[in-house]
Image (cartoon, rainbow, N blue to C red):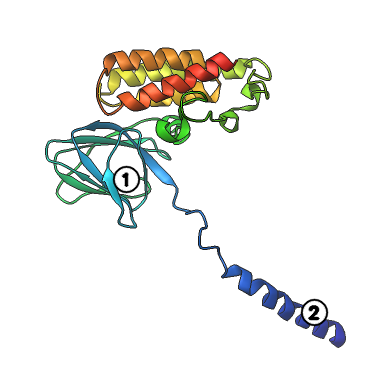
């Protein structure tokens, strides 16, 4: 019995000796674990984004924001931020320096206008990367086509030819119909410059490979916003959806 205990102890020492170096040897280029917590869905005027590492750049519509990032909003500007996990929507107006946390933003002396959207809206926005990254120019126009199959449910998975593996299920159709009703309700309650309703529905339509409907919605949104910070991103998304629709 004593010999067995001694053997076990020696094996444990050997195991710890083998494992310990690995635990502390993370590669230098490992992916950051600080995932995005929200998205800028409305922007009027100018604001500057500063990452936790000190890098900065102008805020853009549809930009995803991480915890501990800072948004410097100018005096004549307004910015709307939606948090993915809770659906909390903050509209900051006027000069403010907003420190973004996981579920809310904090600023000294300034308070945002707060609205609570459904958690489903926040989750859909989380699946919507910025058009410049997720919807590059399709092949033949200076870029590459992006596979969206990783975002699609099983019923909408595409084959190698680009054709849907099978049609939408009844539950898929119900999900899309519910999303359309939610969009209509959101649009009535949301300021015109805030594109959260459109981004929500576009994300759901993309999930189910409804590219023609994405094009229609993008066109309607562009008619309401012929110029502005969202124009370039919406045009890029529209071209991407047109390429996917033609490939069907």
Locate residue 197 relative to residue 247 in the image: left or right. left
Seen in the picture, residue 155 relative to 126 is either above or below; the reply is: above
Q: Is residue 144 visible?
A: yes
Residue furthest left in the image: 75
- Please give the name of the residue rendered at 51% of the width and 63% of the height, measured from the top-left corner: 28
Q: Are marks 1 and 2 in contact (CB under 8 Å)?
A: no
Q: Report the Cα–Cα distance between label 1 and label 2.
A: 50 Å
Residues 2 and 14: in front is 14
Image coordinates for residue 75, horizontal then vertical, percent = 12, 40
Q: Secondary structure at mark 1?
A: loop
Q: Is residue 130 visible?
A: no
Instruction: Residue 232: name its quadrant.
Output: top left
- What residue did someone put label 1 on? 104
Instruction: Residue 229: name its quadrant.
Output: top left
Q: Secondary structure at mark 2?
A: helix
Locate residue 206 relative to residue 102 in the image: left or right. right
Image coordinates for residue 197, horizontal then vertical, percent = 36, 23
Locate residue 170 relative to residue 36 in the image: left or right. right
Q: Quadrant of the C terminus?
A: top right
- What residue did someone put label 2 on? 8
Instruction: Residue 117: name its quadrant.
Output: top left
Residues 60 and 91: in front is 60
Image coordinates for residue 83, horizontal then vertical, percent = 37, 39
Mark 1 closeness class: few <14, some 14–19, many ≥20 residues within 10 Å:
some
Image coordinates for residue 72, horizontal then vertical, percent = 21, 46
């Amino acid at each position: 019995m004593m010999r067995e205990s001694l053997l076990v102890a020696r094996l444990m020492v050997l195991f710890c000796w083998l494992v310990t170096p690995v635990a502390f040897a993370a590669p230098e280029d490992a992916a950051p674990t600080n995932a995005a917590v929200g998205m800028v869905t409305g922007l009027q005027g100018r604001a500057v984004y500063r990452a936790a590492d000190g890098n900065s750049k102008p805020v853009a519509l549809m930009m995803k924001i991480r915890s501990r990032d800072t948004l410097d909003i100018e005096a004549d500007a307004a910015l709307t931020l939606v948090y993915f996990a809770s659906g909390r929507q903050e509209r900051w107006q006027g000069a403010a320096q907003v420190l973004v946390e996981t579920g809310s933003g904090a600023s000294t002396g300034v308070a945002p206008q707060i609205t609570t959207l459904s958690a489903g809206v926040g989750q859909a926005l989380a699946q919507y990367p910025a058009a410049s990254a997720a919807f590059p120019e399709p092949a033949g126009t200076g870029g590459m086509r992006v596979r969206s199959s990783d975002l699609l449910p099983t019923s909408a998975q595409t084959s190698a030819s680009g054709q849907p593996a099978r049609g939408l299920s009844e539950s898929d159709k119900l999900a899309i119909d519910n999303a359309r009703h939610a969009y209509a309700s959101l649009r009535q309650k949301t300021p015109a410059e805030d594109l959260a309703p459109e981004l929500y529905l576009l994300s759901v339509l993309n999930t189910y490979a409804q590219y023609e409907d994405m094009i229609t919605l993008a066109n309607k949104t562009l008619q309401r916003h012929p110029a502005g910070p969202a124009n370039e991103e919406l045009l890029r998304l529209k071209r991407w959806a047109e390429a996917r629709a033609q490939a069907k």
